[in-house]
Amino acid sequence: MTISEQQNTAAPRQGLGLVHTLDGAERDALRARLRAAAAGGAAPARGACREAVEASALPLERIGATLSGGDIPFCLLRNLPVDALAQQWTVGPAPLASGLLLGVTAALGLTNFGYHEEKNGAILQDVHPIAGAEDSQSNAGRVAFHMHVESPFLPRAARPEVGALICLNNETATPTRIATVELVKRQLSARHVLALRQPDFRLRHDQSFEVNGYTLSVTTALLKEVDGRDETRCGIYAEGAHAAAQEAVDAWKRAADAVALDLVLEPGDLLLFNNYRCVHGRGAVEGRRWLKRVYSTRDTSLLSEGLISVWRAMAARHIDHSF
Ligand SMILES: O=C(O)CCC(=O)C(=O)O
Ligand SMILES: [Fe+2]
């Protein structure tokens, strides 16, 4: 991971939350345990991966406390044992990276999930440029991917609480960008913050979802206090319902871009972030690049066999649809 130079602007830059780097011996011990956990099967077993991570030198309690209640609710874990790639690698099985995503999130008490309508229901997802999608605002694109949260068009119970991205290759040093809701909010006028709390915004579904040609949209506030902390659901496709609302969302997006911290993930770096209280994005991708991703949550009310159905989530009567 390298952190780019401070921008020469008035906006402060997002500070790092918890960073923890394993030393060589700690990494090798974790690799041996994960290998044993993955032995015999193509897909590593989550329970065995959790045990391997629990036996490691990772400070799991501090990581969990940072993600749920920290002022800067994201963590960077470095020098983890990921799969070594051949010179001419292709995206395929990566049991160590997969085992780390499953094991770390399980050890934090989180449940992994995917969506029926995204990436064919994959729970462990590969993030890399895909031919034909270069210009898309998605993790398959190459153009800069603007600041967003995961699945903003869905109600909170259907959004990931924690996003996890582990790097296998980032040879042309594309930054992953991240900023806390708190810091973005502090750049805005009181009038804009108040405007963002009103249900005056339209969000529509992300390009990564396959929803039978429908356009799913919802009218909502973009900012809300939940359990004493402000959260956002501002995504790429967020529009104000009137001029003042549009002005506020434009200001939010400008501020998120201005304060975001650029993290150039290196193989073995794992970024975990609270998806309610952080926004993230990605710079433009020039060459080859491969991350693996998993969504996690403590709210399992909409999960069935590890998956959420967008349609069922929208129809659910027992959840709050206002944010
Ligand atoms: O590729 C990255 O660094 C982040 C991509 C992203 O936003 C995602 O996969 O959700
Ligand atoms: Fe994302």
Image (cartoon, helix red, strand yellow):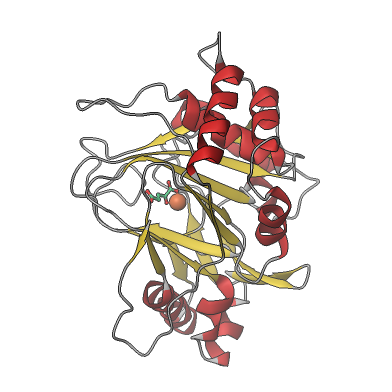
Measuring from the top left, give residue 136's x and y in whole percent.
28, 48
> Is 10 placed above or below 173 here?
below
Which image quadrant is residue 11 in? bottom left
Residue at the spot 45% in from the left edge and 60% down from the top edge: 280
Residue at the spot 43% in from the left edge and 78% down from the top edge: 13
Residue at the spot 50% in from the left edge and 86% down from the top edge: 188
> Is 132 placed above or below 259 here?
above
Q: Is residue 209 visible?
A: yes
Front-most of 81 and 14?
81
> Is 126 placed above or below 248 here?
above
Q: Which residue sits furthest front?
A: 25
Q: Is residue 292 left or right of residue 2?
A: right
Residue at the spot 53% in from the left edge and 69% down from the top edge: 201
Front-most of 57 and 5?
57
Q: Quadrant of the N terminus?
A: bottom left
Measuring from the top left, give residue 24's x and y in whole percent.
48, 41
Q: Is residue 305 visible?
A: no
Front-most of 21 and 223?
21
> Is 186 placed above or below 175 here?
below
Front-most of 213 and 137?
137
Measuring from the top left, give residue 101's x and y in whole percent.
56, 36
